């Protein structure tokens, strides 16, 4: 029996940014096709000779002009065979974490605009992209508690209060700041830079940085990053 299959494979990128106590996602406005003028995630079809992760990075460069360091496969969306009105499309979604204050996305190719939107104030979205974003937010919230991925959303040098606010914002809950600080510092993966920045309680506060090399060394020796908010 001949197998008739006309499925296209696509990739979508959920790029999260964080600034001023707000978690945002990068969207583009479609320039062509049935979804013209609608906001959507960065993404597109995978070439025949192209690895999935290469396709994601290519679409990010072509549509927004940005490059990302943290990129992880999220989920495959295709159960709804009508998720794309043009034809059957299965999309492999990836999410990325960036310091949005250092990026200036510029629309290109089939994107008319590229813009950051707070995750709690998204415009109407094309396809099933709202569902994809919600899935990515759930993954981000969960992973924050067992991997130090939050540092990818902060500047290289940050105030400790900024790290606290990031967790409070994304997890949408208050945290015991004293215990949180004690726990994070006990890991030995966050260190003072020796510089000051901003003002806390009327005086400049210390700046910190995440020591990626130290974290890698610790994980190789069995260290597990875990923050329990119960």
Image: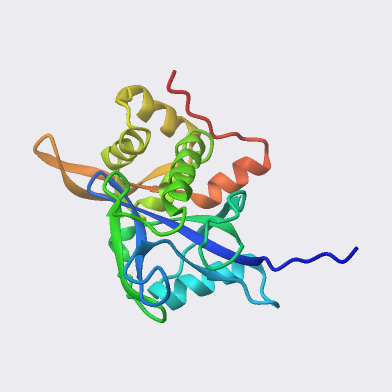
**Picture residue at 31% right of the left edge, 35% below the top:** 164
Vertical side of 4 occupied by 186: above or below: above
Vertical side of 16 occupied by 111: above or below: below
**Picture residue at 26% right of the left edge, 47% below the top:** 121
Q: Position of residue 170 (x, y in %)?
A: 36, 38
Residue 148 appears anywhere in the view: no
Query: Relative to the observer, which residue lies in front, 199 or 150?
Result: 150
Vertical side of 10 occupied by 175: above or below: above
- Toward which corner of the image does residue 165 lie, by quadrant? top left
205 vs 194, left or right, is left
Query: Relative to the observer, which residue lies in front, 66 or 43?
Result: 43
**Picture residue at 63% right of the left edge, 41% below the top:** 219
3 vs 5, left or right, is right
Q: Position of residue 218 (x, y in %)?
A: 60, 41
**Picture residue at 8% right of the left edge, 38% below the top:** 202
Quadrant where the image shows the C terminus: top left
148 vs 99, left or right, is right
């Amino acid at each position: 029996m001949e197998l008739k299959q006309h499925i296209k494979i696509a990739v979508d990128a959920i790029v999260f940014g964080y600034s001023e106590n707000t978690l945002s996602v990068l969207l583009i406005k479609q320039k062509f096709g049935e979804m013209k003028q609608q906001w959507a995630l960065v993404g597109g079809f995978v070439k025949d000779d192209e690895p999935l992760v290469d396709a994601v990075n290519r679409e990010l460069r072509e549509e927004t002009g940005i490059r990302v360091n943290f990129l992880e496969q999220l989920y495959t969306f295709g159960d709804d065979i009508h998720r794309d009105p043009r034809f059957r499309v299965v999309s492999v979604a990836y999410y990325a974490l960036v310091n949005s204050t250092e990026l200036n996305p510029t629309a290109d190719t089939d994107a008319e605009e590229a813009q950051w939107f707070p995750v709690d104030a998204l415009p109407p979205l094309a396809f099933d992209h709202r569902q994809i974003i919600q899935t990515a937010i759930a993954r981000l919230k969960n992973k924050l508690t067992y991997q130090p991925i939050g540092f990818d959303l902060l500047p290289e040098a940050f105030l400790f209060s900024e790290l606290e606010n990031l967790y409070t914002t994304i997890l949408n809950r208050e945290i015991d700041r004293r215990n949180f600080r004690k726990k994070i510092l006990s890991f030995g993966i966050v260190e003072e830079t020796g510089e000051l920045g901003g003002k806390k309680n009327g005086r400049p506060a210390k700046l910190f940085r995440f020591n990626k090399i130290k974290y890698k060394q610790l994980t190789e020796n069995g260290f597990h990053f875990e923050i329990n908010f119960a």
